[in-house]
Amino acid sequence: MGSVYVATIEERIRELKKERGAVILVHNYQRGDVQDVGDFVGDSLGLSRQAAKTDADVILFCGVHFMAETAKILSPDKMVLVPDLNAGCPMANMVTARELRDMKKLHPDAVVVTYVNSTAAVKAESDICCTSANAVKVVDSVPKDKEVLFVPDRNLGRYVEMRLGRKLLLWDGYCPTHQRILPEHVTRLKAQHPAAVVVVHPECVTETIKLADHVASTAGILRFCAQSHAKEFIIGTEIGLLHRLRKESPHKTFYEVSAFADCPNMKLTTLEKALWSLEDLVYEVTVPQEVMGKARVALQRMLEVC
């Protein structure tokens, strides 16, 4: 896209944002030009909480579907839009509410801890939610004599097991993008850049996590890299985060761990789609009242713990 064309779209988006009384939320994994038009850029729960604090009438959520659902749960009176209805999350789709109900029947005494990267319907079947940043703390808050069913990310669950030395019942879900970040990608880059600090997301496989100098959520990675005295970093998460890392720490060097660490669903949102979404007020995300109420309880329990 030519710079004049991009500037024109950005200008029109800002005009429409004022006309609609909208706030634009952009996830850290989105395209760089989409991040640049956001009012808030961050992780899914952090963005939703920001939106709940604003007086905006409309939330344009540039991310994937479950994130927009979370925004709706926390801001039920606001209109929540997504630029592309096809922007889903494969990991969130690896568990359904019906499947979770069936598993709960097999483990009736288990406490269901559900990662926020899940649908509203699955959150509604859960006892408490967690994020990648607070999963260890949330699970640790469950009495030791209680079985914990951790849904849906087995890799994040294994990381929690490592940190706490506690066995969990893990759902067999995963993020395909982080699953593709392999130990050999890290070791190859480390050989090329021996001074680089390895920072990875806990959605990565255990073998990759064990090679990391630091493990953190996207917000944690940003904070760590900004505060670190190191000048070079190997970043083991979805490559969209590197745009913000380079923007916020331009004097440091960041290496993407693998070109395969690219989520196609996250990249479905474009500037044009964001513009069309605000123009036509599409596509609205709704959550049934009963589901919304139960899911909000699981989120609130997490916020109380953390």
Image (cartoon, rainbow, N blue to C red):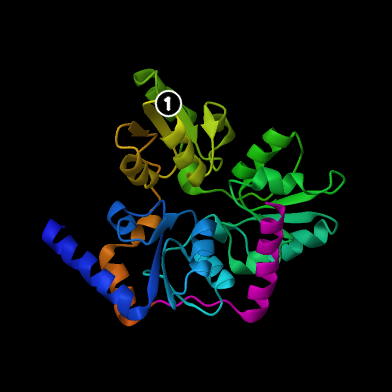
Residue 189 x/y as whole percent: 38, 25
Query: The residue under label 1 is which amino acid type?
Result: His
Residue 247 in the image, given as x and y percentages of width and height:
31, 43
Circle 1 SS class: loop
Question: Residue drawn 45% across and 33% down?
Answer: 227
Q: Residue at x 60, y 68 (%)?
A: 120
Residue 112 visible from this viewpoint = yes
Q: How many marks?
A: 1
Residue 305 lies in the magenta stretch? yes
Q: Which residue is mark 1?
A: 229
Q: Is residue 150 above or below residue 72?
A: above
Depth check, front residue: 215 or 267? 215
Q: Is residue 169 visible?
A: no
Residue shown at 84%/43% (left/top)? 144
Does residue 42 appear to the left or right of 214 in the view shown? left
Mark 1: few/some/many CA within 10 Å (<14, 14-19, 20+): few
Q: Which residues are magenta?
A: 283-306
